[in-house]
Image (tube, grey):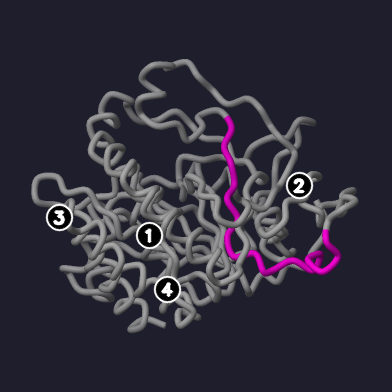
Amino acid sequence: MSKVSINNEEIDIVIGAVQADLTSFLEDWRPFISKFHLIIVQDPDLKGEPKIPDGFKVDVYTKSKIDQTVGASAAALFSGYSCRYFGYLMSRKKYVISIDDDCTPAKDTKGNLVDAIAQHINNLKTPATPFFFNTLYDPFCKGADFVRGYPFSMREGVPCGLSCGLWLNLADYDAPTQALKPGLKNTRYVDAVLTVPVKTFMPVSGINIAFNRELLGPVLFSSFKLEKEGKYRYETMEDIWTGMSVKLISDHLGIGVKTGLPYVSRKERGNAIESLKKEGQGVNLMEQVLPFFQSLSLSKEATTAEDCVKELAAAVKERLGQTDAGFAKTSETMLEWLKIWSANK
């Protein structure tokens, strides 16, 4: 990893808490996160105050504080792991790093603990190269450079807006894969970072990501919700929608997205069969979503992230809302999120 300067005051670490006792989680991460400001957002459906050990600089947001900030009706948008998005809203820092509370620091191939915070910041502070692929992956990593034939006019790269980390042990497999291969673990540590090429979409998971809030903050929200029993709740597929939105808008604005390092290690949790029940509707809808994003072009007038979200919301309503009422609701939620974002800048 090449070295970049890290200013502690530029970074917030957001933790979406769906368990009450965060003692073990925070102790595992203490060597890497204790010097940074933490934003812990508790799932509004979780009862009781979160348990947090001493020695951390932390702001905690529970249901009552979420209600006070956005109103009780809008607070429903932040249930489950979607509570992390409220942390993105409350941050005032340039860089936001988000790690779920079922993750621990990973070990690299030499057995050393991975400093995920430093790697994410390195990814965000070095340029991305989405418009021409470098076969040595990230040319700004230590020991690498641009290969012969890479256009010199493109070697300055573009700003990186999103860093998507990966997972060891329990990878982010979907429910069908987990159900069919219950013993499947990810033990493959690939020491690489690459920029995702322009016009190429990818599954983005909010489990282990970092982003430049100044560039992409208004886009990082899970507006795609699945309704169950009259209630909208985050259930496994929503951040896939968010990732497609972010990639579309990043490509349009000339902002890079990187994936690869850093890894975290995920613990086993959840039930594949139960997840399958929740994911079924979303899996089917995502088959409609990809062609929509692949064919969509935003206008030259959309020059900011907010502009892009507005245009995307209009396209969702017009092209997808006709086929499924859930997409019409998604369009409304995107615009509602922009209002919340503007009111809390």
Disc 3 from disc 1: Cα separation: 30 Å
Q: Which residue does the numbered mark 1 point to in the structure image?
A: 41
Disc 3 from disc 4: Cα separation: 22 Å
Q: Which residue does the numbered mark 2 point to in the structure image?
A: 137
N-term mark: 2 or 3: 2
Viewer-closest of 271 and 142: 142
N-term mark: 1 or 4: 1
Residue 314 located within the stretch drawn in magenta: no
Q: Is residue 86 above or below residue 265?
A: below
Q: Where residue 201 appears, x then y in whole percent?
A: 51, 49
Question: Residue flagged by tag 2: what amino acid is it?
Answer: Tyr
Helix, strand or loop at mark 2? loop
Q: Where residue 196 appears, x then y in whole percent?
A: 62, 51
Q: Which residue does the numbered mark 4 point to in the structure image?
A: 308
Disc 1 from disc 4: Cα separation: 27 Å
Question: Residue flagged by tag 4: what amino acid is it?
Answer: Cys
Question: Residue flagged by tag 1: what amino acid is it?
Answer: Val
Callout 3–callout 1 Cβ contact below 8 Å: no
Callout 1–callout 2 Cβ contact below 8 Å: no
Disc 2 from disc 4: Cα separation: 29 Å
Q: Where residue 307 appears, x then y in whole percent?
A: 41, 79
Q: Which residues are magenta?
A: 151-168
Q: Which residue does the numbered mark 3 point to in the structure image?
A: 325
N-term mark: 2 or 4: 2
Q: Residue at x 48, y 66 (%)?
A: 249
Question: Residue flagged by tag 3: what amino acid is it?
Answer: Ala
- Tell me if 241 is positioned left or right of 98 in this view: left
